[in-house]
Amino acid sequence: VKANGRNQFRFYDDGLRSQREHELEMISDLREALRSDQFVVFYQPRYSVQENRIVGVEALIRWRHPEHGLVAPGHFIPVAESSGLIGQIGEYVLREALRQNAEWRKQGIELEMSVNVSLRQLRSPDFPRLVSKILRQYGCPPASLELELTETALFEDDAVIHANLKALRTEGVRIAIDDFGTGYSNLARLSEVSVDCIKLDRSLIQDFARNRPILRMVIAMCKFMEVTIVAEGVETRDMAAWTAEHGCHELQGYYFSKPVPACEILPLLDQTFSTAADQMSATYVI
Ligand code: C2E
Ligand code: MG
Ligand code: MG
Ligand code: MG
């Protein structure tokens, strides 16, 4: 969660030491977390409007900290990125998510798996090879994997990043732009990059009453690009109805489910969700 960024050292801040000291302590704890398996992956369902069912999940890391309990990624991903540990942490998430995907597959459950990838991971020349190795190891089809990147990663003028994106897409892995509409979206650059999916940031969705004109325009543009449009942060039936009605293909958010451990995904697959416009509250205006 972006708002947590400021508090990333909250657990480590005793008010006596410098920020650098907190950071160093967290880095050593993150190393220990990798060694002793303290990271876990939660999953949040992605609901398809057309199919009226859950068709995929997003893998979201958590840190089961021995003293602080379950720590959200906003508290430690920035430090993982700046320290370089994101390489190993990101590899863990990719491996665990595809292992889980293969386990579901064995049970006859096919779900598309989305995994968040940091700019730093994408900058590694070995990244596409690592991804194909893990896909092969678990026997997952490349098209079952989607990698979520932020606009900053996609618009970076970096030859390795461009080559990596090309290699991944050639293999059949899907690429998504995460948190679209938050930064200074460069609409001109958007037509230069090839992506399969655009995820509209939850700040746009949650204030949809005010953002309607922007949302309409962005959705129209995404349709033109023929990408899958995902609405993030759908919390209410009204948000679900409006985004479904206005052309978002997939919806994700607390209205359907919070991110949950893998074992809690299965019961959600049989659940029905209402996103019909006639179910919207009376105060709702299209
Ligand atoms: P994201 O990729 O945009 O993930 C969506 C975030 O929004 C998740 O927060 C999710 O719990 C939250 N969310 C989903 N639906 C709703 C809703 O209806 N309302 C509200 N208020 N929030 C909702 P989470 O799990 O704390 O993750 C935060 C961010 O941390 C992610 O944002 C992603 O950028 C990053 N992250 C998570 N896992 C990984 C990972 O494995 N690798 C990397 N590099 N980053 C990760
Ligand atoms: Mg994401
Ligand atoms: Mg997002
Ligand atoms: Mg994000």
Image: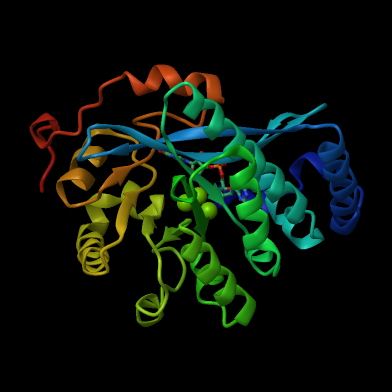
Residue displayed at 90% across by 53% down: 24
| Residue 257 vs residue 104, the one in the foreground | 104
Report whether 23 appears left or right of 156: right
The answer to whether residue 126 shows anywhere in this view is: yes
> Up-down: is 89 above or below 256?
below
Q: How many marks?
A: 0
Q: Residue at x 57, y 75 (%)?
A: 163
Left or right placement of residue 67 versus residue 251 in this view:
right
Give the percent coordinates (x, y) of residue 137: 65, 42
Residue at the spot 30% in from the left edge and 54% down from the top edge: 229
Q: Nearer the viewer, residue 238 or 189?
A: 189
Q: Residue at point 54% right, 32% down?
A: 102
Pinpoint residue 95: horizontal percent, then vertical percent.
66, 41
Using the image, determine if residue 268 lies above or below residue 157: above
Quadrant location of residue 29? top right
Left-right relation of 49 to 193? left
Q: Specify whether 266 is left or right of 219.
A: right
Judging from the image, the colouring scheme is rainbow
8 or 57, which is in the foreground? 57
The image shows residue 31 at horizontal and vertical percentages of 86, 44
Q: Is residue 76 visible?
A: no
Q: Position of residue 173 (x, y in %)?
A: 48, 56
